[in-house]
Amino acid sequence: MARIVIAPDSFKGSLPAHLVAQAIAEGWREVRPDDELILLPMADGGEGTLKAIALAHPSAVWHRDIVTGPHGQPVEAAWLMLSDSTAVLEIAQTSGLPLMEALDPVGATTRGLGELIGIALDAGAKSMIIGLGGSATTDAGLGVLEGLGAVITRHPDRPGVTGVEAIDTTSMRKIPLGMITLLTDTIVTMRDAPAVFGPQKGASPADVAVLTEAFDHLVALADDASAHLQPGSGAAGGSAWGLITHCGATMQPGAAALAQLIGLPEAISTADFVITGEGRFDETSLHGKVCGYVYELAQAAGVAGAFVVGSADDHVVPGWAVTTLVEYAESTSEAMAQPQHHLSHSAAAIARIF
């Protein structure tokens, strides 16, 4: 009997991580029913972070509250309270791309995240983890500050972050230094966030230029002008910068932090084989993403493994096979339409070789 750790990311646009893990497990059991399977679905701070942590912490309590969405209308946002009074939040819940009917790179707000931070504090949170993946915003976290009570003066003719004239945090809710930990999956700085992330959120070249100028102005307004140079400060359209500069937050790579929370390093250290995967696998997958981090853990522990992915380029990973769903489906669209079937098929094929 072998011990198999299954720790995939979500297949974005197709299947959440916990269902990916279940499908892989079903395929493996068809071939090797006596093996011990350890399912630890992963995330890197984006959508799926709450679910992954909840599965690893059965005593965690789910909360759902109404806050301001990215479009200014109310949305219901889920969050977790762990047994040690750590609150776990996702910006995707309050300000995520799927919440937008139409993209608005200049006007979309993170206000709901600030409101949710306040709700978690009122509920007794002693520390806070915030996943910053999947946002629809490029407001440098100013909405978060407003949601916490800050007063931001704007030019009447310029919307959102582009018209900021002054930031007054006097009446903003006070948060202890270091209480908030941000989970990021990028090394982009705040200064580069409009150019890198703006187009993903609907920004035209003209929008990018205006947003970049606005971000430079925000840096000039801040007492601490160094945070915008930190790798990762551009996460969630610069929201990481806003939380670091005005709320004393710290950052951690999302995949590594989540792995610690769910006990992945310990599980891999005693495993005989590891399977991870994601929807699209390319060279960037090995740098700060879930697949790359799981691979690094397994390599360090001397444990063999494999990737099961939706599709992949020709990038070769030393020692590990890369199995794609499109190898077993008639087309990419068909693989996306029935991912669980093809994941099980792929896992069974790997089990036969194992």
Image (tube, rainbow, N blue to C red):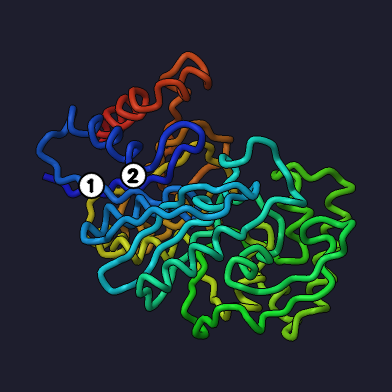
Q: Dot 1, how many residues are within 10 Å of its Cα: few (below 14), some (14-19), or many (20+)?
A: many
Give above or below for 149 relative to 268. below
Give above or below for 312 relative to 272. above
Q: Dot 2, how many residues are within 10 Å of its Cα: few (below 14), some (14-19), or many (20+)?
A: many
Q: Looking at the rendering, which quadrant does residue 109 occupy?
A: bottom right
Q: Could you say which is closer to the camera, residue 15 or residue 222?
A: 222
Give above or below for 97 relative to 27. below
Give me the residue at 40% from left, 21% from top: 338
Q: Could you say which is closer to the camera, residue 52 or residue 341?
A: 52
Give me the residue at 43% from left, 64% from top: 256
In the displayed structure, does residue 152 sit left or right of residue 351? right
Which residue has dot 2 on it?
275
Task: Inspect the image, locate mark 2, and give the three-letter code of the amino acid beneath it.
Answer: Ile
Which residue has dot 1 on it?
4
Residue 8 position within the rendered picture, expressed as x and y whole percent measured from the top left: 38, 45
Q: Are marks 1 and 2 in contact (CB under 8 Å)?
A: yes
Q: Could you say which is closer to the camera, residue 169 or residue 337?
A: 169
Residue 350 position within the rendered picture, expressed as x and y whole percent measured from the top left: 30, 33
In the displayed structure, does residue 266 sit left or right of residue 154? left
Upstream in sequence: badge 1 or badge 2 = 1
